[in-house]
Amino acid sequence: MTDVLLPLSIAVPIVAATLPIALGLRYDDVGWPVAAVATLGLVGSAVAVAVEVYTGGPFDHELGGFAPPIGIELVADELSAAVFLLVSLVSAATLVLSRAIGPRGNAFHSAYLLLAGGLAGVSLTGDLFNLFVFLEIVGLTTYALIAADRSGASAYASLKYLVVGTVGASLYLVGVGYVFLATGTLNMADVSVQIVERASYTDPLVQAGFAFIAVGFALKIALFPVHTWQPDAYQRAPDAVTTLVAALVSTASAYALIRVSYSVFTVDFLAANDAIVTGILLVAGVSILAGSALAVMQSDLKRMFAYSSVAQFGMIVAAVGIADETALLGGIVHLVGHGLLKFGLFCGLALLAAGYGARRVEDLASLARDAPFASGALAVLGLALVGIPPSIGFLGKWYIALGAVRSAGATGGVVGVGIAAVILASTLFTLAYVARVIERLYFAGVDREDAEHGGAAGHAGYADGSDRDAGTAVADGGSGDATVPGTVPTAPLVVLVVAALVAVGLGFAGAGFETLLDPYLSEVFA
């Protein structure tokens, strides 16, 4: 009966999403308890699925009892279980953050649950068309959440994402159509078989299908140069929404690219289509460099780390194109690690913005004195993003670069070495902007007496024009409301510190990742 967990994991949050709106007609503020109960159930389900997969192996569920390829199949394997666990834990942690700093309305919690259900569906589906359906659920709810504060700027960012996301989804659907014409099926496992039996890896329909799907995912992942929706969406969305979107939405699309590339088209397709692989690696390399360079130029903190995501996802896409077992392991580790790191970074930025009005790099001046725990966690997560060992950020980059060099040695090509060099250059760029953040937090040299009296020795007070009053500030871990200047609420602060500790702890888990993911990697590279 374990397989029943799969449909329930998707259905429960989607069905629960109707309750905040329905019950809200009679009860106020009912959204958070409904969301909390549903999210705890999602976490429990994800843990159960992960335990079953990593101890007993992959399993599936045939919806309605109809066997694939006719019926729709849900699949849990080593890759999907890891992503599903990330989705559930980050969703729960974001709910803690939103409880403290908002949004708090019933409509928000309804959209939040719908997004969680869509992300679970993306993680677990074994059907190409159903993947499109769940990606659309994720997209539509994300558009609404970005515009949740009802400002003109957030509405514009949401509309921009709506247009780009719709184009991306349409291109993906066109690609699926080509694949269906070539194979006559939509089940992922069956497509991989029918490509060989009914078509070939060089069939124009198959090649066109992959090309459209890859470009569609590039738009949703936000690779350069089709990344422009992402900085606006991250900057203009409410802080808790940015945290959720940055950690999971593009991550789900990057996971889908890995799933389709290796479980549907397979590594043999990549080996037979050098031009496609070269195109993937070129786009990935440019995205890594451009995203890193653009991040260095930013003063707005949310835009800085938004451009950082353009670079980090470029590394994951590069791992897909390298088609090496070690590189793909690094891509998966980096996928999970990036989700964790971006959750922690945007959570930390949200707490500092809510408590101290810090939204730009200059606003961070000597904040470590007032918010030592939040600042320390932010610094640790930033260094993990750079790839300082031991950290999950280092582990993912190391495996990708190692796989790139190894693949270059095996084929005699220089593209792999180029990708490794680009990753090194990106690491230096990342160090540059993370160092700016840490320098402002710890070494800005603001005179506390001047700061208390509005002196501008490097910091002129809050972003809203008020002065930071160190005498009345509640220290990190205080119980004050985050909307009151000088306070950081305890619950999300604990979540932030735990995220930083986990990011460091997972840096020691290289052998563990290899063991857990080896069955999946052995299957796709068999």
Image (spheres, rainbow, N blue to C red):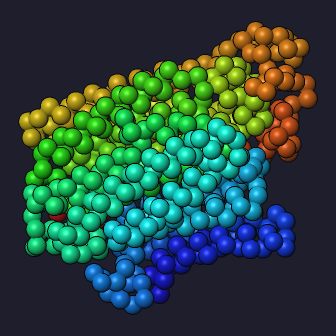
Please say if 523 is above or below 296: below
Across and down, in percent, residue 151 comes to 70, 41
What residue is rendered at 78% in x and 10% in y? 456
Please say if 396 is above or below 304: below
Across and down, in percent, residue 247 comes to 53, 48
What residue is rendered at 67% in x and 14% in y? 444
**Looking at the image, which is closer to me, 65 or 315?**
65
**Residue 196 appears left or right of 516:** left
Across and down, in percent, residue 309 comes to 46, 38
- Can residue 218 be seen by looking at this rendering? yes
- Can residue 509 be seen by looking at this rendering? no
Name the residue at the right extreme: 472
**Looking at the image, which is closer to me, 159 or 275?**
159
Question: In terms of image quadrants, where is residue 198?
Answer: bottom left
Across and down, in percent, residue 40 comes to 65, 68
What residue is rendered at 18% in x and 34% in y? 415
Name the quadrant of the C terminus. Answer: bottom left
Please say if 465 is above or below 160: above
**Residue 205 appears left or right of 148:** left
Name the residue at the bottom extreme: 65
**Residue 466 appears left or right of 322:** right
